[in-house]
Image: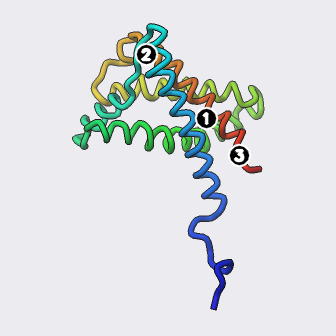
Amino acid sequence: MTSSTDRTPILPSRFAQTLGLMFISGLVATVAFDLWGQIISPALGFANLSPHGLARSLLGTFGLPNGDFAGYFMHFYLVGLIGYPVGWLYVFRPVWSRLAGQRGGWFVPAVLYGFGLWVFAIGGITAVAGLPFFLNFTGITWVALVGHVLYGIVMVAVMRLVAVR
């Protein structure tokens, strides 16, 4: 007979902590991105971001369902809560640490990561989705640049605030 404390957890605690850290930081950063791109930027007279539209175009390119729900699901959940945080934790941050050590603190690499996300999304994903390269450098391109850099800064700041050491 075993008690409830004798059971092995379903997920290792470190994995669960990392997953929670990714979701929380990705959620807050995605909200900041969307707040900037869909509310603040248009209120200031700049372009209105529609990241779910890019996701829909990409899905359609591959012949996948590309309705509104699919676009929002891909943008918010797959990219914002999982993809971009994974890229930071397991690709960019380790490479930055190896190449630059602690130079730049946390802010400089977070800005550079956001810039890289912009190049990836607006320079790369748009091309794969059949859209013009960097969306022809229209107003939406620059609003997206600010949004992706903001995402990187907010995500890393939140990770630093909630990380269990």
Colour basis: rainbow
- Residue 29 location (% of width, % of height): 56, 33
Using a 10 Å C-alpha cutoff, classify the residue at mark 1 as few (fewer than 14 neighbours), some (14 to 19) or many (20 or more). many
Callout 2–callout 3 Cβ contact below 8 Å = no
Q: Amino acid at mark 2?
A: Thr
Q: What SS does tag 1 mark?
A: helix
* Camera-nearest label, 2 or 1: 1
Q: Is residue 100 above or below residue 90?
A: above
Badge 3 density bin: few <14, some 14–19, many ≥20, Cα 10 Å: few
Of the image marks 1 and 3, the number of the one nearer the N terminus = 1
The amino acid type of the residue labelled 1 equals: Met
- Residue at label 1? 155
**Mark 1 to mark 3 CA distance (whole Å):** 12 Å
The residue at the far bottom in this view is 1
Q: CA distance from mark 2 to mark 3?
A: 32 Å
Q: Who comes first in sequence, dot 2 or dot 3?
A: 2
Compute the Cα span from label 2 to label 1.
21 Å
Q: Which mark is residue 163?
A: 3
Position of residue 153 measured from the top left corner of the image (x, y, whole percent) = 63, 28
The reply to whether callout 2 and callout 1 are in contact (CB within 8 Å) is no
Q: Secondary structure at mark 2?
A: helix
**Image quarter for residue 157?**
top right
Q: Is residue 135 left or right of residue 98?
A: left
